[in-house]
Image (cartoon, rainbow, N blue to C red):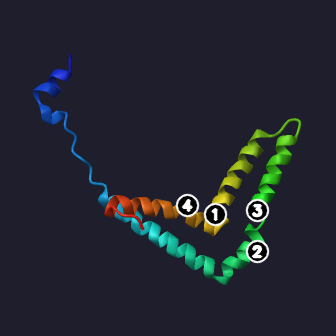
Amino acid sequence: MNNSNLVIENPTLSEEKPIDRKPYLRQREGEIVKILDAINGVQMSKDWSTLKNYVFDGLVQTLNKDIQEEARKEQPDTLKLNRLAGQLKWAEKYSDLNRMRDIFRPELSNIRKKLYGKEE
């Protein structure tokens, strides 16, 4: 059966209705604004500086060193390398709040361009 005849006979089948993405974009805009506010609040707290000093400082370097050591072995454990790579990706994303903020800002800017047609 040739379905192209159906489209020719009934042009409404070939016309797709545009999907209104504005409600989703507004919701995502609100979420990102809250995330950025939370990042700013956490970064200003004394507790974050304590965590940063004792937990996160040097974490990325340590994981990189562990990956290099494992990769240099004669028979590296691929499971361990994959686990360390996942931990490294997590540490790079979440241990530096400035970097995390830099991830969300462009997304917010793009959403606002789509919603309001202007840049910040």
List the residue tagged with mark 1: 94
Q: Amino acid at mark 1?
A: Tyr
Q: Amino acid at mark 3?
A: Leu
Q: Earlier in the sequence, mark 2 or mark 3?
A: 2
Q: Are marks 2 and 4 in contact (CB under 8 Å)?
A: no
Q: Residue at x 72, y 73 (%)?
A: 52
Question: Given this view, does label 2 or label 4 mark the residue nearer the observer?
Answer: 4
Which residue extends farthest left? 9
For residue 96, what is the image quadrant? bottom right
Q: CA distance from mark 2 to mark 1?
A: 14 Å
Q: CA distance from mark 2 to mark 3?
A: 10 Å
Q: CA distance from mark 4 to mark 3?
A: 20 Å
Question: Given this view, does label 4 or label 3 mark the residue nearer the observer?
Answer: 4
List the residue tagged with mark 2: 53
List the residue tagged with mark 3: 59
Q: Earlier in the sequence, mark 2 or mark 4?
A: 2
Q: Residues within 10 Å of mark 3 (few under 14, many from 20)?
A: some
Q: Earlier in the sequence, mark 4 or mark 3?
A: 3
Q: Are marks 2 and 3 in contact (CB under 8 Å)?
A: no
List the residue tagged with mark 4: 103
Under circle 4, the secondary element is helix
Q: Earlier in the sequence, mark 4 or mark 1?
A: 1
Q: CA distance from mark 1 to mark 3?
A: 11 Å
Q: Earlier in the sequence, mark 2 or mark 1?
A: 2
